Amino acid sequence: MKKISKSLFADNDERPDCCTTEEWKNRFRISAKLGQINYRSAFIFFTRNGWSWSSGINNLIATHPEIQQIQKELQNDA
């Protein structure tokens, strides 16, 4: 299994000195270039459910079975 390194700033409640304001502000930001079919289908899916892009992506991540398993593993490690 490939080792995953976590964000240096994700678990912090306060901005560390080594972190710029921009890095801190965008620490949870996701950016992706989608193929045409993925963009169109996501747009329709989110619109039909009354979600913004952020809400839609959060919903997809929260309900994906493999990601749910990882979330359980992370909670057990805490």
Image (cartoon, rainbow, N blue to C red):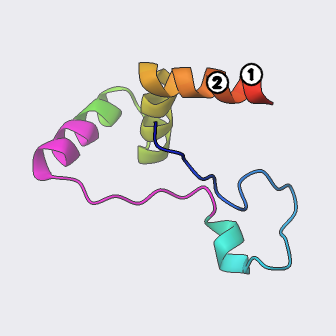
**Closest to the observer: 28 or 78?**
78
**Closest to the observer: 71 or 60?**
71
Q: Position of residue 18 (x, y in %)?
A: 79, 79
Q: Position of residue 53 (x, y in %)?
A: 41, 46
Q: Judge whether residue 35 is colored magenta.
A: yes
What residue sits 65% from the left and 73% below the top?
A: 23
Residue matched to label 1: 76
Is disc 1 in contact with disc 2, using a CB cutoff of under 8 Å?
Answer: yes
Within 10 angstroms of label 1, few (less than 14), some, or many (20 or more) residues? few
Relative to 12, residue 23 above or below: below
Relative placement, left or right, of 48 versus 18 is left
What residue sits 64% from the left and 62% below the top?
A: 27
The label shown at residue 73 is 2
Relative to 65, residue 23 above or below: below
Q: Secondary structure at mark 1?
A: helix
Q: Position of residue 26 (x, y in %)?
A: 61, 66
